[in-house]
Image (tube, rainbow, N blue to C red):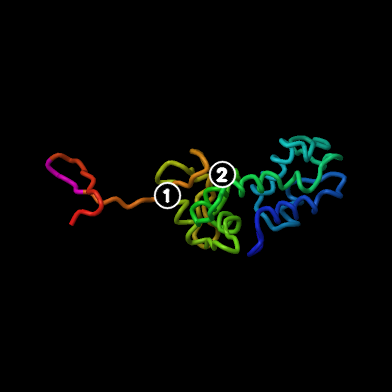
Amino acid sequence: MSQGRTSQEELHAAFLAVVEKTEFLPEDIQRACGVSPSVAARYVRNWKRTGVAEVARADGHRRYYRIAAHARADQATQEIRDEMVAAPSETQHGNMWRTMRLLSEFTPTDIAAHSSTEETYVSELIAGAYCRVLVAAGYLRVVRKAVPGKRTATYRLIRNTGPHAPREKRVRAVYDENLGEFTHVARGLA
C-alpha cells in the first residue's frame, strides 16, 4: 500500500483495477495495486464470500475470477469500512491488530503499510517488534523465516481473540527464589 493510502482506498483501487476485466487472478490485483500476494488473495476471497466476485473458470488448480454483474464498488469496500467503524480510537497496536485479523499471512512490511494512517504512523521496525512479541505469546506463527538482507519473516495469526489488541505489559513483581514464585507488587507503594 502506498504511504498515506487507507485500506479502504486500496481495496477500492483493487476493485477498479479488475472490475472491467472479463476475468482476473489475484496476481492482477497485486501488480495493479502493489499489494502482497496474501493481501490480493484475501481481497478476492472476501469478494467471493460476499458475492462481489465469482469464479469465472478453473484451469487445473488455478481459479480465474470475475466481478459479479450486480457488484458495486461500495460493496467491495464494506468489510474494511465495517472494521474501521469498530475501532473508535486509532493506536499503533490497535491498527496493527486489525490488520493482522484481516490478512491471512503477512510480513512486518505489510503490517506497517496497512496500519499507517494520517493520524497514526506505524514503522516496519515497530510492526516487526509487535510480531515478535505476539509470536512469543502464541498469537502468531512464523510461516516463513526471515533471511537477513533478503526478506523479512512471514507470519500467520493463529489466535484471534477479538477486536482489542493484545499488548505487552511490564509488571512489577518480586521473585522469591525460596518459593520459586513471583508476587505482584501493586502500583502506588513506596
Residue 9: mark? none
Q: Is residue 103 magenta?
A: no
Q: Secondary structure at mark 1?
A: loop
**Residue 169 percent across, percent down from the top left:** 36, 51
Name above or below for residue 3 compared with residue 173: below
- Left or right: residue 50 compared with residue 117: right
Q: Which residues are magenta?
A: 174-178
Name the residue: 66% across, 48% down.
81
Question: Is 186 or 182 nearer to us in this picture?
Answer: 186
Q: Quadrant of the C terminus?
A: bottom left
Residue 167: mark? 1
Name the residue: 48% across, 53% down.
93
What residue sits right under mark 2 in the picture?
A: 101
* Residue type beneath disc 2: Arg
Q: Is residue 177 magenta?
A: yes
**Residue 66 percent across, percent down from the top left:** 82, 42
* Residue type beneath disc 1: Arg
Q: Residues within 10 Å of mark 2 (few under 14, many from 20)?
A: many
- Left or right: residue 22 compared with residue 161: right
Earlier in the chain: of badge 1 and badge 2, it is 2
